[in-house]
Structure formats: C-alpha cells, structure tokens
Amino acid sequence: MKKIAIYGQYLQEDSLSTIASVLKQLHLRDCDVYMEQDYVSLIGDKIDLNMEGTFKSLDTSFDLMISIGGDGTILRAVSYIGKLNIPVMGINTGRLGFLATLQSEELELAFTLLFNKKYRLSKRSLITATSKHPENHLVPDNFALNEVTVSRQNTTSMIQIETHLNGELLTSYWADGLIVSTPTGSTGYSLSCGGPVITPDTKALVITPIAPHNLNARPLVIPDETVITVKVMGRENEFLASLDNRIASYPDETEITLKKADFTIDLIELEHVSFIKTIRHKLLWGEDKRN
C-alpha cells in the first residue's frame, strides 16, 4: 500500500493527536499521503501535516482510505469510493463504533498488522435507490452502506408507506417512517427501532418500521435479491428519503425502488478484530452488570 487517502468530518478532542500518529505511521512506511480538502481546512496549522496533497474526489490510483472519526464518518467516506474498490480502515475517535473499530491507542499495532498483510477484507453489501423523479440521489451517488429510510417531513402526522416485494404487495405501513437496511446497517438506525442484529456476511435485507401505528407491524428479514418498492402518502406534499446520512425530499406518491447494489465496499478487519468481538464488546453481551 503506497498511496493513502485520509478522510474526517470533525475535529474531536483527541483527533489532532490521532491524526499526527496516523501520519507518523504512514511516513515511517514511505507512503504518499493525501487528505480530503475540507478536513485539511478544519485542521489548519494546528499540526504539521507533511503530506503529498489533498483530494476532492478519488480514483483507482489510491490503495487505501483511512477514516478518522465514528461510524458516520465512514459512511461519508464510502460516498467517495463507490465502485472504485478502495478498501477502508476506520479509526474511532467517536463513541459507539461498529464500523470504526480501531482505537487511537492501538495505532502502532494496527499499522504493523496492516502492512504485514495480517488482515481480511470484509465485503459489505449496499442498497441502491432509484425513482422516476428527475432530481435527488442521482446515479452514481444513489447508494447506501447502512440503510435507506423514508420518513415524514414537517409534520407530526404519520405517513402511509405502501410497500411491494418483487411486485407483490407486502403491506401499507402507517408509521413515522420505514428503514430498509443492509446487514451492516442492522446495528444502526434499524437496531434502535427494534430490528435484529445480522452478521455482515448474511445475504439479507431488513425492513423495519419506525414507530408503527399498526401495532402488529414487525421488522422483516428478506433475501437480499428482493426488489423493494415503496410509495409514501401523507398530509404533507413531500417526504424525506435518506441514504445513510444524505437526505433529499420527494413529492408525495413518488415510487422509490430499492435493491442490492452490484458492487461492495471492502472494510479492513485486522486479525485481532471481528464482528462477533465487536458486538460482544459494544452491546455488553455476557457481562454481569448487577450490583
């Protein structure tokens, strides 16, 4: 790995020391380092960056992207990658991280393992969203690693979400919204709305209603080859559709088609890290918290 991209959104309290440590490890290995332009502006002259340049977009010449932040930062980093097959390594300076699993205090070990090729690529599926609406979430930026969510806009009233699977009516959800998540996204918004945790290599999607008013509505796990269409109707003229953290509004009754993308995102998992270890640690499974 020679040409490295670094991306971040915010400067957390300990971000500067983490950035400096990352740069030190990369320069020790004679890497060419490029940092996202807006991130460089945030850092300013607080530390000596000593890098080859900045980027606004990526190309296939890059060997690796390093994301510094939390899971939300990785989701934004993925939007730069798309179909480029550039693997991502997440360094966590945020809070609860299921994607950004490396901690700043283990950077020396992490880079030693990385450059000794003691890692695996966890291939993560994505969802694409298309509609006949001429704007919003256009190809090729119409994909999500975690989830696609439709929800109400500027109203406290519930919306009706007519949902079809492979052309067959599933149901009309009366709810605040609907989440369609990948296995990766099963530990995100879907989980907070009562959805199941799914291991990343499972070939499935999860449909999770948000605060459903029809109380018998439950999260549903379906094969990831299923084509899902949703149509939202409500008292307002528009509704919101979000792809991870990218949000757009659509006119009522716009039909959105969701399906698995024809490409994956590669997340680097070092040999001492696994999804099972991560959820056991993050969700405190098996720990006795009784006093």
Image (cartoon, grey):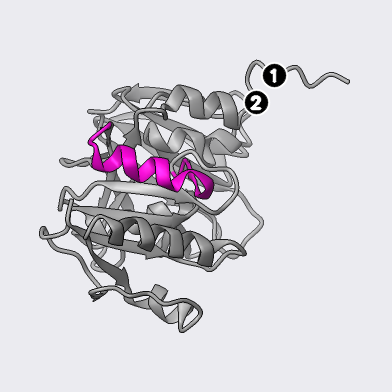
Which residue is at a point 24% across and 30% down the rendered structure image?
Answer: 166
Question: As shown in the figure, which amino acid type bears the numbered disc 2?
Answer: Leu
User: Toward which corner of the image does residue 198 lie, by quadrant?
Assistant: top left
Q: Quadrant of the C terminus?
A: top right
* Residue 24 place in picture, x, y as percent: 37, 61
Front position in the image: 150 or 125: 125
Q: Verify whether residue 96 appears in magenta.
A: no
At mark 2, the secondary structure is loop
Front position in the image: 2 or 66: 2
Against 152, residue 271 (above or below) is above
Front position in the image: 213 or 285: 285
Answer few, some or many: residues within 10 Å of disc 1's Cα (few below 14, many 20 plus, some between 14 and 19): few
Q: Seen in the image, is 89 located left or right of residue 236? A: left
* Residue 146 place in picture, x, y as percent: 40, 43
Q: Main secondary structure of the magenta part?
A: helix
* Residue 135 place in picture, x, y as percent: 27, 68
Q: What is the CA distance from the residue labelled 1 to the residue labelled 2?
A: 6 Å
User: Which span of residues is magenta-colored?
Assistant: 100-118
Residue under numbered circle 2: 284
